Image (spheres, rainbow, N blue to C red):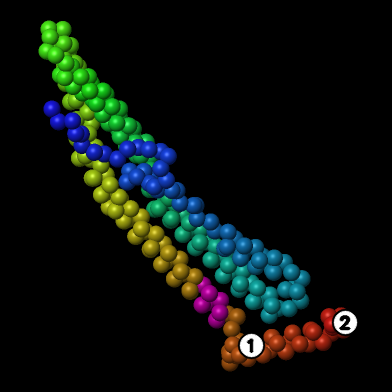
Amino acid sequence: MCKQTPFLPSTDHKRKTLLPWEPPPPLPPPCPALSKSAVKISVDLLSNPLCEQDQDLLNMVTALDTAMKRMDAFNQEKVNQIQKTVIEPLKKFGSVFPSLNMAVKRREQALQDYRRLQAKVEKYEEKEKTGPVLAKLHQAREELRPVREDFEAKNRQLLEEMPRFYGSRLDYFQPSFESLIRAQVVYYSEMHKIFGDLTQQLDQPGHSDEQRERENEAKLSELRALSIVADD
């Protein structure tokens, strides 16, 4: 009888490399903290007394506040989309791994039982063929037969199903990746529109970036000239 058994990787939980059937590490949940901070800044600016004194400043800050709230709404929509199309499917995919790992463990236990009884049969086969030895050999072979069949069934099942499981990952996750890309495209397209509209509202016709920079430097120089901020 052949002593070799079909090979399957061992479930050694001390190893650091993920086995093909082990779940990937969980993704961090998407966080809309940036847009929330932007909304808080615009709200704080609106409550500043300077906005009550300067109508132009109030109009600018109001436009900024509207843009930031639109950004936050689209960001939350993107977060919800990612949660629904990526995070949740990943969790569902990971839920099958305990059962799969248990099937591998059952196969390994069956293999150990098979090897133990096979060694017992070989021990009696090597002894002198006396009546008692032949009786024990027959009994050992009878014990081995169902154990061998059980192992071969479990091993065959894993050899047939694990490649299909491993190969199904792309088909499972492709829709999630497509949804993730679409969500990002929609989000950044809307961000381009939002900030484009904001730029048109805040932009001063005829002013280039260089002119605005010179004006800001001039105003900063006036502030520096004040005695209360002058260098000692």
- State which quarter of the image contains the N terminus: top left
- In the rendered image, residue 139, in percent from the top left (x then y), is placed at 17, 13
Instruction: Estimate how packed mark 2 is, as few (under 14), some (14 to 19) or many (20 or more) residues with alpha carbons within 10 Å.
Output: few
Which residue is found at the position 69% from the left and 86% from the top?
Answer: 216
Q: CA distance from mark 2 to mark 1?
A: 30 Å
Give SS at disc 2: loop
* Side of 144 relative to 31 (left or right): left
Q: Residues within 10 Å of mark 1 (few under 14, many from 20)?
A: few
Q: Position of residue 200 (x, y in %)?
A: 55, 81
Question: Going 64% across and 76% down the picture, which residue do you hit?
Answer: 60
Q: Disc 2 marks which residue?
A: 232
Find residue 23 and report its image quarter. top left
Answer with left or right where residue 42 lies relative to residue 11: right
Q: Nearer the viewer, mark 2 or mark 1?
A: 2
Inspect the image, locate mark 2, and give the three-letter code of the amino acid beneath it. Asp
* Mark 2 or 1, nearer chain start: 1
Is residue 121 shown to the viewer in this render? no
Extent of the magenta region:
194-200
Q: Which residue is mark 1?
A: 212
| Left/right of residue 201 with respect to residue 138 in the rendered view | right
Q: Nearer the viewer, residue 200 or 231?
A: 231
Q: Nearer the viewer, residue 35 or 227?
A: 227
Task: Specify the amino acid type for callout 1.
Answer: Arg
| Secondary structure mainly formed by the magenta segment | helix
Q: Give the vertical position of 151 relative to 96 (above or below).
A: above
x then y, percent, for residue 145: 16, 21
| Residue plotted at (25% across, 42% down) | 162
* Quarter that holds the C terminus: bottom right
